[in-house]
Amino acid sequence: MNILLIGSGGREHALAWKLAQSRLLAGDGDQFYAAPGNPGIAEHAECVALDAGDHAAVLEFCSAKAIGLVAVGPEAPLVNGLGDALRNAGIPVFGPNQGPAQLEGSKGFTKDLCERAGIPTAGYVRTTSLDEAITALDRFSPPYVLKADGLAAGKGVVLPETREEAEAALEDMFGGRFGAAGAEVVIEEFMVGEEASFFALTDGTAILPLGSAQDHKRVGEGDTGPNTGGMGAYSPAPVLTAALQQDVMDRIITPTVDALRAEGTPYSGVLFAGLMLTDKGPKLIEYNARFGDPECQVLMMRLEEDLGELMLACAEGKLSEYSAANLSSETALTVVMAANGYPGTPEKGGAIQLGSAETSSAKVFHAGTKIEGEQLRANGGRVLNVTAMGANVTQAQTAAYAAVDAITFPTGFCRRDIGWREVERESP
Ligand code: ATP
């Protein structure tokens, strides 16, 4: 079969690496394309210049190349309706339609769905004007949680400590700081607890749990400094015990999938739940309509299934043929190497030598790289995802940093403490 992967980051390199091992691509003449891809993805797929926002061009490409499966990595094409365009043309696609992708595209949509389906989450109010939002603040106490409704590249959430800061932040948000994404602001109750991520595959009816992860959003060690797209992650997250995962399946994931199907907008693809583990049990913080980046990298390292076949089963409504999606019981941990300056203005063009970083248990996924002649160079904020396996978080961390230390990247940096919470819990 011919497969097209959409995306260009570390998440997509991990998907490409795993898809390249699929039986779906094992036949003579099977072609694997990525749009637009990156130098790491190019080791597995033919990278093509195709704009995922141009649905007609994507359809034309799929028809010309007889594509049998499109795997969509990032959220923007899904929220923009690429899934619908492909499904309407009869092309199997991994990723939801625009309607159910609103789980990620609109925080208000998700909160309303949680209310209708009785899913545990923070109390909230949706507001569409500054006056309404300021009045609504009376119903909450600090710290406040203010969220631009739409996609804001992970930057649309503000957590002001005081009423004054909250009002100033609301003025900013309704003043256009997040563009159209901030035309509505959701105000939420502040939840206290440890955060964890949970992933499930679904074809709209059948659901397969795909395991847990924890990431590190802050740029600095000890989880300090500004937020980033994610500086590292590990899977599984032992804090999300088997009992808690069952609870998440029963009270959060299954009711969500059931409600969307019942409402005529079935969700197909991967459902990524951001959770707060509160003293009253897991509560939903947010949904994403795609794999996390860098959580995908650690999940793909552990996945012991044929990713292509799993994605096709989601796309074709055949996920009930699986009883489980098996994952290694080992831990995978990924360290993000970023360009100096990130998350501000990253220094581009720095030379990179990967050396002997890759071993049988360590893999380097490319996030923001380019090739100039023979030289690999930094070409973005997050540049490499150095990922390794180990018997527990401590051992995976040791292996990942051994791989990091084998890489020469003078204009880059990484956090040296990815997994610290779990390493502390694991130490005698
Ligand atoms: P992401 O970067 O994960 O895409 P996002 O902008 O889509 O983030 P959320 O995940 O909803 O937004 O929130 C970002 C962060 O803000 C959360 O990871 C969490 O730390 C914090 N947060 C969000 N909602 C709450 C809440 N109700 N109570 C406490 N903290 C919260």
Image (spheres, grey):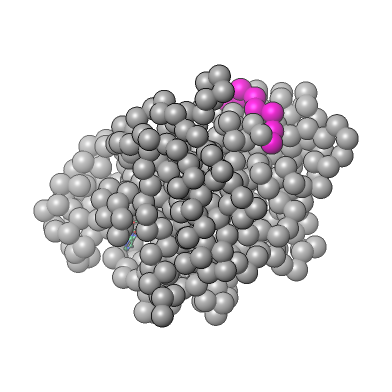
Work out whether residue 160 can be spotted.
yes
Front residue of 335 and 270: 335
Ligand 1: image quarter:
bottom left
Q: Which picture quadrant has residue 65?
A: top right
Front residue of 394 and 74: 394
Q: Position of residue 302 (x, y in %)?
A: 63, 59
Residue at 75% in and 46% down: 21
Residue at 81% in and 47% down: 23
Residue at 61% in and 24% down: 50
| Quadrant of the drawing holding the C terminus | bottom left
Would you place residue 72 above or below residue 121 in this image? above
Q: Position of residue 288 (x, y in %)?
A: 50, 52
State the residue lying farthest toward the left: 164
The magenta region covers 44-51
Per the picture, the main secondary structure of the magenta-coloured stretch is: loop
Q: Position of residue 25 (x, y in %)?
A: 80, 41
On screen, residue 380 versus residue 44, left or right, reads: left
State the residue lying farthest toward the top: 373
Picture mark count: 0
Residue at 50% in and 34% down: 353
Q: Position of residue 409 (x, y in %)?
A: 42, 36
Would you place residue 201 above or below residue 72 in this image? below
Would you place residue 276 above or below residue 228 in this image? below
| Quadrant of the drawing holding the N terminus | top right
Front residue of 284 and 84: 284
Work out whether residue 247 can be spotted.
no
- The reply to whether the magenta stretch includes residue 49 is yes
On screen, residue 296 versus residue 67, left or right, reads: left
